[in-house]
Image (cartoon, rainbow, N blue to C red):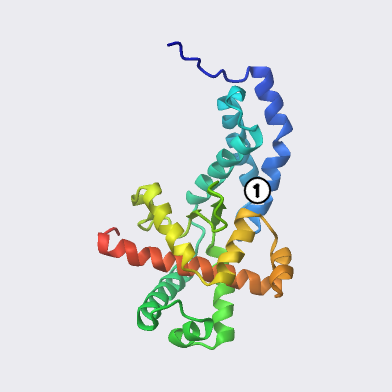
C-alpha cells in the first residue's frame, strides 16, 4: 500500500501566507495585551507572534484540508504564551494575595460544601466586599488565561491553560491530565462565571460586550472573570497537593 505524504507549501506560498496574516498576529496580541499589565510591551507580543506565524507557514500542509487561519492561531498563541511565561512580571504581593485567596476558597468550599459567594469570601479574608472587589482588580494584573474550544460541541469550556504562578506545580503535570481536571473544575463554577469565561475566551468578546449581555459594567465583568480564575486555581491546587507536587 502506497502512503501519500502531504506536501508543505513552497517558499513563495509560505511568504504569501505570512504577509497575509500579519494582521491576525496584531489582533491576537491586542486581545491578549488587554489582560496584561502595562509593562508587557505589545510590540514584544507581536514579534513573538510573527515567529509563531512563520513556524506555522513552514509546517502548513494544504492537502490536509485544515484552513491556515485555524492552523496558525494555535501556534501564534503558543508563541506568545511561551514568551510571557519567561517573564517574572507578577509582584510578590500579588503572589501572596493569590495564595491567600486560594486558601480561603479551599477552606470555604469544604466548610460550605459549595462554591462560596463573594460576601463569604470577603468575610473570610477579613475585608469588606468593596475591598475584596478591589483585590480582584489587583489580581487581574496577574491573570493570563487562554481558552480554546474543544471542538466537541459542548458549550462549556473544555480547554483552558492558566499561566499563573508558573514556578508552581502546573508545569510538572501532563497537560492532558491537567486539562481534564480543569474541564471538570470549570463545570463546577457558578453559571454566570462559567458563561463569562466562555464569552471572554472562546468567543473573544470584549468586557463591554459581555457586560451588555449579562447586564453589568466592564469593571464588574473583569472582577467576576478574575474570581472565576481564582476558583479554578484553588480547585487545581486542592488536587495537586495530595500528589506532593511543589
| Above or below, 86 relative to 12 | below
User: Can you give x and y, in whole percent of width and height, for residue 147 in the image?
Assistant: 55, 53
Residue drawn at (53%, 81%) of the image: 118
Mark 1, residue position? 29
Tell me which residue sits at (37%, 51%) in the image.
Answer: 177
Q: Quadrant of residue 131?
A: bottom right
Q: Is residue 240 left or right of residue 139?
A: left
Callout 1 environment at 10 Å: few (<14), some (14 to 19), or many (20+)? Answer: many
Identify the residue at the far top of this view: 2
**Residue closer to the observer: 197 or 151:** 151
Q: Residue at x 53, y 43 (%)?
A: 78
- Describe the element under mark 1 as helix, strand or loop: helix
Q: Quadrant of the image for the N terminus?
A: top left
Image quarter hosting the C terminus: bottom left
Residue 165 seen in render: no
Let me know if residue 62 appears in the view: yes
Q: Position of residue 212 (x, y in %)?
A: 74, 69
Residue 66 is drawn in which quadrant?
A: top right
Q: Is residue 178 above or below residue 119?
A: above
Q: Where is residue 178 drawn, in percent x and y?
A: 39, 53
**Residue 116 rendering spot, x and y as whole percentages:** 46, 80
Count of numbered circles in the view: 1
Nearer to the camera, 141 or 198: 198
Amino acid at each position: 500500500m502506497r502512503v501519500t505524504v502531504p506536501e508543505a507549501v513552497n517558499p513563495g506560498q509560505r511568504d504569501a501566507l505570512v504577509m497575509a496574516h500579519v494582521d491576525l498576529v496584531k489582533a491576537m496580541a491586542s486581545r491578549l495585551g488587554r489582560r496584561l499589565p502595562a509593562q508587557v510591551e505589545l510590540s514584544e507580543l507581536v514579534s513573538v507572534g510573527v515567529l509563531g506565524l512563520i513556524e506555522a507557514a513552514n509546517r502548513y500542509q494544504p492537502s490536509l484540508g485544515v484552513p491556515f487561519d485555524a492552523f496558525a492561531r494555535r501556534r501564534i498563541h503558543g508563541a506568545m504564551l511561551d514568551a510571557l511565561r519567561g517573564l517574572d512580571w507578577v509582584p510578590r504581593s500579588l503572589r501572596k494575595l493569590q495564595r491567600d485567596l486560594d486558601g480561603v476558597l479551599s477552606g470555604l468550599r469544604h466548610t460550605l460544601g459549595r462554591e462560596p459567594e463573594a460576601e463569604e469570601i470577603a468575610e473570610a479574608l477579613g475585608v469588606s466586599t468593596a475591598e475584596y472587589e478591589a483585590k480582584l482588580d489587583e489580581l487581574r494584573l496577574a491573570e493570563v488565561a487562554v481558552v480554546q474550544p474543544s471542538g466537541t460541541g459542548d458549550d462549556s469550556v473544555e480547554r483552558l491553560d492558566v499561566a499563573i504562578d508558573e514556578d508552581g506545580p502546573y508545569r510538572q503535570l501532563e497537560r492532558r491530565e491537567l486539562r481534564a481536571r480543569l474541564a471538570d473544575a470549570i463545570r463546577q463554577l457558578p453559571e454566570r462565571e462559567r458563561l463569562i469565561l466562555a464569552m471572554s475566551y472562546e468567543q473573544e468578546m470584549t468586557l463591554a460586550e459581555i457586560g451588555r449581555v449579562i447586564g453589568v459594567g466592564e469593571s464588574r465583568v473583569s472582577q467576576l472573570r478574575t474570581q472565576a480564575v481564582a476558583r479554578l486555581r484553588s480547585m487545581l491546587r486542592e488536587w495537586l497537593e495530595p500528589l506532593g507536587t511543589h
